[in-house]
Image (tube, rainbow, N blue to C red):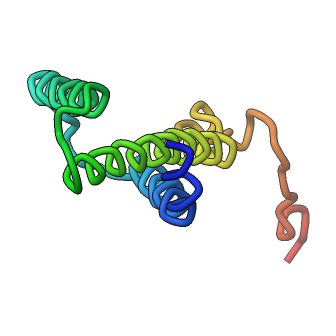
Amino acid sequence: MMYMISFHWDWLLASLLLGFCMGWIAVVSRVRSVTPRWTLILSVLAAVLVALALTRIVPGRFGYWLDLLLLMFAPYLVGCAIGSLLREWVVKRTAPPAQEALHPPLEGEGGSQQANPHEGRAG
């Protein structure tokens, strides 16, 4: 495994950065989320792939590709998590407070009142 990490470090870094970008975009995305049924199906598929890799049932080149796929999937998921958390944090910090955004202060409630320049002039 260390050989694969040292040999494919650039691809692992690329998958981390790609995951970061996808996580950053995913917070803004307005698509439907994955249904619980599909979540279960994808989780079972991931568990089967990990079991195949750990038991070394898949030999040769395809086993190597399976190991590499799983090895690259881990930094991708980490990048997705980091990107989405950072984007959410940035959006929360730059968004105005909900109360002020919905109900701006009226003239009599406070805030700066500007004097009318035409008030008090006899004309």
Up/down of 61 relative to 52, above or below: below
Q: Which of the two residues, 12 or 107, is positioned nearer the viewer here?
A: 12
- Residue positioned 54% across, 48% down in the render: 83
* Left or right: 48 in relation to 12: left
> Extreme bottom residue here?
123
- Residue positioned 19% across, 44% down in the render: 59
Up/down of 42 relative to 28, above or below: above
* Left or right: 113 in relation to 24: right
Q: Which of the two residues, 63 or 98, is positioned nearer the viewer here?
A: 63
Q: Position of residue 112 (x, y in %)?
A: 85, 49
* Left or right: 72 in relation to 105: left
> What quarter of the picture does the C terminus occupy?
bottom right
- Residue positioned 41% across, 50% down in the render: 72
Q: Position of residue 76 (x, y in %)?
A: 44, 48
Q: Which of the two residues, 68 or 109, is positioned nearer the viewer here?
A: 68
Q: Position of residue 16 (x, y in %)?
A: 52, 54
Q: Position of residue 11 (x, y in %)?
A: 48, 63
Q: Quadrant of residue 36?
A: top left
- Residue positioned 19% across, 34% down in the render: 34
Q: Quadrant of residue 106?
A: top right
